[in-house]
Every structure is written in structure tokens, then in C-alpha cells.
């Protein structure tokens, strides 16, 4: 009977424990990124949900003085039109101000006349699938969501590594496991080499 050194038994136990619990902890996020990878790759399947609205109004002209009051303008537009995106850009020139808000699957752009305070705004809501696709990419979704993506990537990497380590402790499955891993790696490499322009 073969005797496994203590360090091997401990490595196997730690790998198994990490693999099980990291897999369960990250299951939801793995499922989310798997599904959105598919919806992102086939965005044309989910077209037709975009809804665009046009608004007109006017803001207090005192906010448009020499020193444009950006905060008041942004908060007024948010309150009045229930804008959900984050402020993306605020540009000022001699005749007008342009304000842009962006979020996952969302955009709102306002053009304000500095002389009169009147503005026109276009708001675009691109639908549920656009929202989750933008979340997958981290587009216009903020720093906290960016951290969620980074943590998810680390978790999936650890799940993969611990699963790979475990195959070396399953003597009856080691050869077939490594063979399937090699075939999967070869298929991905061949697809990239042959079919990616």
C-alpha cells in the first residue's frame, strides 16, 4: 500500500475544501457570466427593446452664469427626469452646455442653451439584455461593479486551479482527466489559430 506524505494529504484536503466552497460561493456569478457571455455573443437575438424619449425644458438662468453651476444643473436634471445613470461628461462652451449620463444599457444626453436656459434631452433605455451585457463588460457600471468583476475573475481562477490540482489525487481518473483537459486546450487553441482573423 502506497503511503502519501503528509503534505500531499494536506494539499489534497485543502484543494478539495477550497474547490467545493469556492465553487458554491461563486456559482451565481459563474452562471451570470456564462449566460451573459452567450447573450453578448448573440446580441442580435435580443434586439428591439430600445426605447428613446425626448424631453424639453428650461433651467434657472442664474446657474448658467460665468461660473456654470454644474451641481445644480445635474441634480435638477436628475430630479426632473428620474435619470438613473452616472454623470459621464459635462462640457461647457460659449453658447451651450452638454451633459451626458451613462449607465448599463442607459444613456441620457442634454444640450442646454446658456443664453436662455432652455434644453433638449434624449434618454435611451436599451432594455434588460443590454443592461446585463453591459454588466458583463463592466461598461458604465461604476467602480464597485468593477471590483465585483475582478473578484469574480479571481474566484473562477481559484476554482479552476483547485479543480486541476485535485485531478492529480484521483489516480483512476488522472489520465482521462488530463487527456480531456488537453483536448479542451487544443480545441480552444485551434479555434483561435484557424478561425480568428
Image (spheres, grey):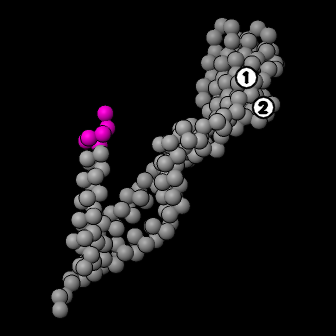
Q: Which residues are magenta?
A: 192-197
* Residue carrying label 1: 121
Q: Is residue 37 left or right of residue 72?
A: left
Please give the name of the residue rendered at 76% of the width and 17% of the height, measured from the top-left corner.
Answer: 119
Depth check, front residue: 25 or 129: 129
Q: Quadrant of the C terminus?
A: top left
Outermost left residue: 2
Whether the magenta-drawn stretch holds residue 195 is answered as yes
Horizontally, residue 6 falls left or right of residue 157, namely left
Label number found at residue 155:
none
Residue assigned mark 2: 81
Q: Would you place residue 130 above or below residue 17 in this image?
A: above
Q: Tell me whether the residue at label 2 lies in contact with that at label 1, contact meaning CB atoms closer than 8 angstroms.
A: yes
Left or right of 169: which side holds 83?
right
Mark toward the start of the polypeptide (2 vs 1): 2
| Residue at the extreme front of the image, as rendered | 45
Tell me if residue 77 comes above or below residue 140 in the rendering.
above
Amino acid at each position: 500500500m502506497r503511503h502519501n506524505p503528509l503534505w500531499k494529504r494536506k494539499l489534497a484536503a485543502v484543494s478539495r475544501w477550497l474547490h467545493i466552497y469556492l465553487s458554491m460561493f461563486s456559482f451565481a456569478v459563474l452562471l451570470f457570466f456564462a449566460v451573459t457571455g452567450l447573450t453578448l455573443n448573440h446580441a442580435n437575438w435580443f434586439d428591439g427593446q430600445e426605447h428613446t424619449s425626448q424631453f424639453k425644458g428650461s433651467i434657472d438662468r442664474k446657474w448658467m452664469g460665468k461660473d456654470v453651476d454644474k451641481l445644480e444643473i445635474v441634480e435638477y436634471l436628475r430630479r426632473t427626469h428620474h435619470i438613473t445613470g452616472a454623470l459621464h461628461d459635462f462640457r461647457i462652451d460659449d453658447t451651450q452646455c452638454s451633459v451626458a449620463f451613462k449607465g448599463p444599457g442607459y444613456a441620457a444626453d442634454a444640450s442646454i442653451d446658456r443664453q436662455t436656459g432652455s434644453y433638449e434631452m434624449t434618454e435611451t433605455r436599451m432594455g434588460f439584455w443590454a443592461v446585463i451585457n453591459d454588466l458583463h463588460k463592466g461598461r458604465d457600471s461604476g467602480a464597485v461593479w468593477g471590483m465585483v468583476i475582478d473578484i469574480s475573475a479571481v474566484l473562477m481562477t481559484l476554482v479552476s486551479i483547485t479543480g486541476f490540482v485535485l485531478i492529480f489525487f484521483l489516480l483512476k481518473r488522472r489520465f482521462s482527466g488530463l487527456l480531456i483537459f488537453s483536448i479542451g486546450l487544443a480545441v480552444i487553441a485551434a479555434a483561435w489559430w484557424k478561425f480568428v482573423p
